[in-house]
Amino acid sequence: MHAIRLHTFGPAENLTYEQVDDPTPGPGQVRIAVAAAGVHLLDTALREGMQGPAPEPTPLPTIPGREVAGTVDALGEGTPELWRGKRVVAHLGFQPGGYAELAVTDMERLHEIPAGLDFAQAVAMIGTGRTAMGILQFTDLGPDSVAVVPAAAGGIGTLLVQYARHTGATVIGLAGGPAKTALVEANGADLAVDYTDPAWPEKVRAYLGGRPATVVFDGVGGEIAREATSLLSPTGQHLVFGWSGEGLHDGTPYLVEGVSEQVLGPAMLSRAGGPDPLRTLELRALTEAATGHLTPSVHRFPLAEAATAHRALENRGTTGKVVLEP
C-alpha cells in the first residue's frame, strides 16, 4: 500500500509518500480500506516532536493520522463476519496509522457510517464533530443567546455556527479575509466579520445595538480572544478549547476571571458520561450529521499531498475539516 511516513520530526516536508507493507489485522481487529483520513492541528505539532496528550512519545518512523473512514476489507481472528464490507469510521486513539491506503483498528472503535454521509463527512464528525459536541455541553443555547465564534470557517467553528443557529441563537462568526467570511455567512451566521479588520469589534457592537454576547467559543486565543471577550456580558461564558492564535507550543489561552473555562480534558469527559465518554460524543456527532442538523465542511487533499495539507493548515489556508483522500 501507499502511506505517508515520518522518519524525522520537523517541518511538513518531512512527510513522505512511500510504498510500505500492507498491515494485517490482529485478534478482534479489522482492516479498513481508507477512503478519507482526517488531519488535525495536533497532527502538525506531533509531526514536529510534541508529545501532546499521548502517554509516550511516538516512535519513528511512523504513519501519522488518527481518524479514518472507509470500507472493512479484512478481519482479524474473532472479529464477526458481519463487519466485512461495512462502511465504517473510527478514531484510532493514540495509535497512529491513518494517513494510508489501509489502516487497522480494534472493532470496538468502529461506527457504521449512517446513510447519507460520505466518507469525508464521517471522518470530520468522528474527531472534530465529537469535540464540538463536547464543547456544547458547557452552555445552554437558545433564542436569547448571542454566540461569538472565532475561527468560524474552521472545522469546529463551522459546526458551532450551525448548531447555535439551529437553537435560534444570534451568531457572530469571525474569520480571516473576505473569502472565509463569505463562507461563514453562507453557513448561517447572522453576522460574519473579518477579524483582520481592526474595527471588527465596533462592527459587532453596532450590529448588536448594545446587546452583549452571552458566550464566546474560543479555539484561537491571542488578541482575537481578548477582543471577543470584551463583548461578553458580566455573566457570559468564555469557553476555551484551543489557542492556535498564540501557538500550540508555548502559548496559553487568554482567560478572563469569572467567565473563562477550559473545556477540553476530564471536564468534557465527565459531562459526556457513559462507560466510554468519547464514544458517547462520537455517536452524538454522527447522529447530528445523519439527521441533517449539522453538515461538516470538508477541505480535501490527495493523500500524496499530506505535506501541502499540513502547511495549509498551519498557515490558516484551509476551511472546514482537512481530509486526505487516497
Image: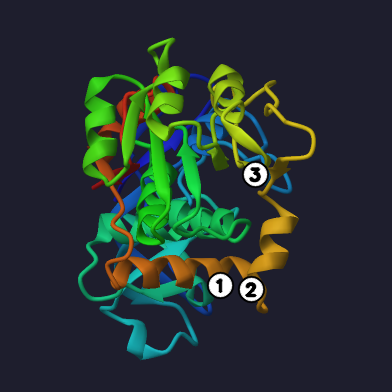
Task: Specify whether 41 is left or right of 249.
Answer: left
Number of marks present in the image shown: 3
Q: Which residue is mark 3?
A: 237
Q: Secondary structure at mark 3?
A: strand
Q: Report the side of 210 relative to 118 (left or right).
A: right
Q: Nearer the viewer, residue 49 or 268?
A: 268
The residue to which callout 1 is attached is 280
Position in image of residue 113 (x %, y %): 31, 72
In the current view of this chain or complex, which residue is farthest to the top?
198
User: Can I make out residue 189 in this image?
Assistant: yes
Q: Earlier in the sequence, mark 1 or mark 3?
A: 3
**Structural crowding at the residue carrying mark 2, measured as other residues with C-alpha within 10 Å and reported as few (<14), some (14–19) or many (≥20):** few
Count residues near mark 1 (Cα–Cα under 10 Å), then give few for <14, some for 14-19, many for 20+: some
Q: Is residue 99 visible in the rendered structure shown here?
A: no
- Name the residue furthest front: 209
Rendering coords of residue 114 (x, y %): 29, 75
Task: Please tell me which residue lies in front, 323 or 213.
Answer: 213
Q: Residue at x 41, y 61 (%)?
A: 167
**The residue positioned farthest toward the right in the image shown:** 257
Say which of marks 2 and 3 sits in front. 3
Residue to which mark 2 is pinned: 276
Amino acid tagged 3: Gln
Compute the Cα span from label 1 to label 3: 24 Å
Q: Quadrant of residue 48?
A: top right
Q: Is residue 153 above or below residue 316?
A: below
Q: Which of disc 3 and disc 2 is earlier in sequence?
A: 3
Q: Is residue 224 left or right of residue 159?
A: right
**Front one among 227 and 281:** 227
The amino acid on which the numbered mark 2 sits, given as a three-letter code, is Asp
State if disc 2 and disc 1 touch (CB < 8 Å): yes
Q: Is residue 70 above or below residue 37?
A: below
